[in-house]
Image (cartoon, rainbow, N blue to C red):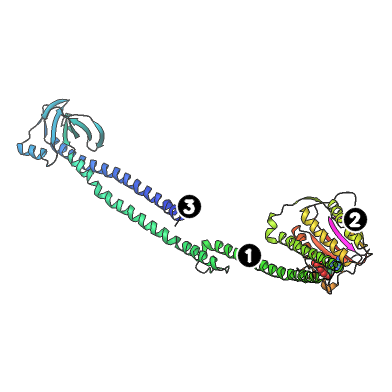
Amino acid sequence: MTRPPGRWLQRELRRRLMLPVLAIVVISVVVSAFNAHALVERIFDRWLLDAAHSLGSQVRFQGGQASVQLSPQSESVLTYDVVDRIFYEVLQDGRHVAGQPGLPQLGRKATRYRHNSEAFDASYGGIDVRVGRVQVQGPHGDSAVVLVAETRTKRELALRAQVLVFAPVAILAVVAWLVVSSAVRRTLRPLRRMAQAWNDGSHTSLEPMATQDVPRELMPFAVALNDLLARVRELLLRERHFAATAAHQLRTPLAGLQLGLARAAACPDLASTRAALDELASSTQRAARMVQQLLALSRVDPAARGAIEMVDVDLVALAREVGEAYMDAAQARHTTLELDAGEQPVHVQGQPSLLSEALGNLIDNALRYTPPGGRVTISVRPEPPALGVADSGPGIAADETDKVFDRFVRGRGMTGEGSGLGLAIVKEITALHRAEIVLGRSEELGGLAVTLRFPAA
Ligand SMILES: Nc1ncnc2c1ncn2[C@@H]1O[C@H](COP(=O)(O)OP(=O)(O)O)[C@@H](O)[C@H]1O
Ligand SMILES: [Mg+2]
């Protein structure tokens, strides 16, 4: 299976949840390590200063002279320790009185305690020691200093034991990771299930998907997808219907062609063959026109609308150009084709080739349904912009005015050439331009008047 591109929601969620958890774990480990260290130092400092105080209580002042009388038992009690070595010294005004001489009197990381005492780190004879220092007051303002020092082994051991405290924290972090991972996976499971269901479903049908199991956050997607499916379904149905009708409609001219060909083949002489071929030529033209109209319709299909580019179009110039193209056809029917427009251009936003197609269909109808010798007028009006075609023909019966815009619908009793697509094309193109179609009776000419009214520029 290839990995789909893009981000993994699951990974991102896990990362976003785990980073804070890990940060909390690390911070709490650092803070508790710091606290534990301070606590260990404090506890052992107390013991050290207790020893110094009890030694201080043995100091005697006689005539301003400090002295210490320690029995061997007391001394061994004072200096006994299983793991560390202990040293002591008593001084008066910087002068050695008792104990091991030369213990440091100052050092680093000093901590002050009550009763004139403090503890600090120092080095004695090349060994790292912690020293407790106590000031002892005599009865007549005399004073002495008691120092007790011990190596740091106990303290180091105690600090190392902290690992035992942090091991559970590490385990907790791992557990948190597992919990977060599984929670994220479970939360995202409906998403995956939905995607799967939709994937499976959309392969086989365009039916809407069931939404009862969809989580609320995903509901907008589900609704949007179902909407899309509905639109696709509708479009497909329309297309299918259109294709079926078009195929059906094309069958008639094709059958005519076949028949004409057979007749031409059976003609006994050149003259009748030529007549049959002429007929064939005109039915070929009809079929070609129908195909062209079908193409025009598919071009203005609602699905393709977004792709159509609107430009500035001068309706007067457009009417003149299209009208000229129909001059020959009008002459052939002895019909007068005129343009009724002012000197000024009339601008609308539109697609020139589609507008020409619409106008062409209107002129074609007017010429086709107006009896020979009649009149057809193309008119352009500026306010609001309007384009119209009027003729002196029979017009459209009131009960037919709605239906004639449907595809493949022709007026009652229309047996001549025609596919019923012309006005449908005009309707689609008009809608595309947000214009309005008005069907009516021409006051001047008496026949049909079709007007396209465009939104004011
Ligand atoms: N200028 C017109 N005068 C009278 N009837 C018309 C005119 N234009 C259209 N019609 C009626 O409207 C119907 C539909 O027109 P159209 O969609 O162009 O199809 P077609 O021209 O192929 O019949 C025509 O069959 C005809 O009955
Ligand atoms: Mg027509």
> In whole angstroms, how far apart are the C-alphas of marks 2 and 1?
43 Å
On screen, residue 34 versus residue 202, left or right, reads left
Q: Is mark 1 within 8 Å of ligand 1?
A: no
Q: Is disc 3 placed on a helix, strand or loop?
A: loop
The label number, if any, that marks residue 58 in the structure image:
none
Is 389 magenta? The answer is: yes
Q: Give how far across and how far down residue 289 sits, in percent.
A: 78, 63
Q: Identify the residue at horizontal 73%, vertical 70% (top origin).
A: 251
- Res 65 seen here: no
Tell me the crowding category of disc 2: few under 14, some 14 to 19, or many 20 or more residues within 10 angstroms, Cα based. Answer: some
Q: Which region of the structure is painted magenta?
A: 379-394
> In whole angstroms, how far apart are the C-alphas of marks 1 and 3?
29 Å
Q: Amino acid at mark 1?
A: Arg
Q: Identify the residue at horizontal 25%, vertical 47% (top origin).
A: 163
Marks 1/3 in contact by CB < 8 Å: the verdict is no
The label number, if any, that marks residue 7 in the structure image:
3
In the rendered image of this protein, does residue 224 appear above or below residue 56? below
In the rendered image of this protein, does residue 84 appear above or below residue 280? above
Mark 3 or mark 2: whose residue is earlier in sequence: 3
Tell me the crowding category of disc 3: few under 14, some 14 to 19, or many 20 or more residues within 10 angstroms, Cα based. Answer: few
The label number, if any, that marks residue 339 in the structure image:
2
Where ligand 1 lies, by image quadrant?
bottom right
